[in-house]
Image: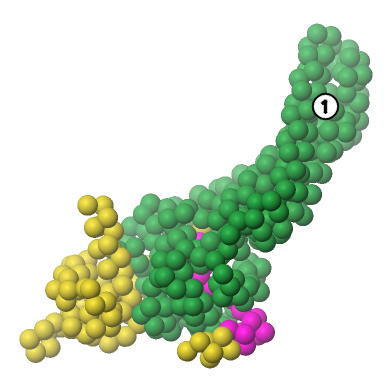
Chain colours: A yellow, B green
Amino acid sequence: MGEQRRDHGALEAEVMAVLWAEGRPMTAGQVHEALGAADLHPKTVLTVLGRLHTKGLLGRERTGRAHAYAPNRGPADEVASQMNQALVRGADRLAVLQHFVAGLDPADEQALRDLLDTRD
Amino acid sequence: MYFTVYLVILAPVALAALGPAVSRHLAPAAAVRVLTALLAAAAAATCWGLFALAAAGLANLPRPHGRWGGDGRALAVADPVPWGLGVLAAALLAVVAVRLLTGWRRHAARRRALGAVRSAPAAGDLLVLPDDRADAYALPGRPGRVVVTAGLLRALSAEERAVLLAHERAHLACRHDRYAALAQAAVLVNPLFGRLRDEVGYGVERWADELAAEAVGSRRLAVRSLARAALAGACRPAGPPVLAYLRHRIADRAAALQGERPVNRWHRVWPAAGALLVVGAASADLGVAFARCLGAVLSS
């Protein structure tokens, strides 16, 4: 039960990430395709989209027979302003937040570019 | 007691010097745990040493009557700490206490402020910031949240985003914030531990990198995601200067991920274990000497 709920949470996150990354309204079919998960049932994606819509995180409009979903700006703006308020108070962010990447100097930047070139 | 006190205060510096060797020879998870334990022990030893010096020195304050009603001569014999040193140690101890208290209050205030963010509606554990800059971080607590900017989501492919989410979830699942907070507290006690604290900061990132690579089943993919995210962030103005110490280590993280999965070589960290043992023994010895001293004072 707990396992299943966590999976749903992870799926919600993935769907949301896709919609923000694409930056355009998408139908359940398009989201399913962008997720690239063959083992995922299209209907599951539709369920997740519905749940995110209920939470107020997604807006939707009817396009033909399906709904197209896009992220709502409002909740995200709200979180951003709360985040800023909280972070303005303290300088040492390390103890509270762990960043994925924190910064880069020019030599490292070139090394990483080379790395991406050789691996793609 | 005289000698032991200084050992207790100075030994942590030796411990701090051994830190980098620990992270070189152990896999990130073990390295972070060992380094944090070293820091906690070293910070405790510093406090204990200062406390002993302060108590012993202050008891020798030049007064007509002994501090606890006795004539004080018994104490002066048992414990030759000059009173000036005692005053200095007491002052340092007070500074440490104030630094810890302010640090703790700031930490608590920030956590409270972040509580509002935590209760905002999220997609599973994900919060997206409508920001074009590339940034991502884990927001620990209950419930923990992964915060990512729209800019970074756009910069990554679907499978690279999976690495990013796995990395931040690893921070949350392993409670990396606790190691970081403990390391920070140790630096508040003794600023000489700054280097070791940075080593812990690097270690938790490496730890999360390894878990993310495991989660997506590909070290190559993990490197690519890290490189892409770093480059997306690099086009923007630099972050707060306080994080500058992590700045040079993205390339180190990428190089580590390109290598084999790290294993623990415990036999290489014996010097650190030895130093820890010395600090422990010195602290214990100090405790015994202190108890004897107290006995001498009370019976005089």
User: Splitting the image into 4 quarters, where does residue B46 fall?
Assistant: top right
The extreme left residue here reads A65
Horizontal side of residue A61 vs B189, given as left or right: left
**The N terminus of chain B is located in which quarter?**
top right
Taking the magenta stretch, the answer to whether it contains residue A109 is: yes
Taking the magenta stretch, the answer to whether it contains residue A93 is: no
Q: Name the residue under label 1.
A: B56
For the point 46% across and 77% down, the residue is: B221
Magenta segment boundaries in residue numbering? A97-112
Number of dots carrying numbers: 1
Expressed as whole percent of the image width and height from the top left, the position of residue B103 reads 60, 50
Q: Is residue B217 visible?
A: yes
Expressed as whole percent of the image width and height from the top left, the position of residue B233 reads 53, 80
For the point 31% across and 72% down, the residue is: A14
For the point 56% across and 75% down, the residue is: B258
Query: Is A77 above or below relative to B266?
Result: below
Which chain is disc 1 placed on? B
Tell me which amino acid carries mark 1: Ala
SS of the residue under disc 1:
helix
Expressed as whole percent of the image width and height from the top left, the position of residue B255 reads 60, 75
Instruction: Rate crowding at label 1 as few (under 14), some (14 to 19) or many (20 or more) other CA atoms within 10 Å.
Output: many
Expressed as whole percent of the image width and height from the top left, the position of residue B106 reads 55, 52
User: Splitting the image into 4 quarters, where does residue B88 fall?
Assistant: top right
For the point 42% across and 82% down, the residue is: B156
A79 or B38: nearer the eye? Answer: B38
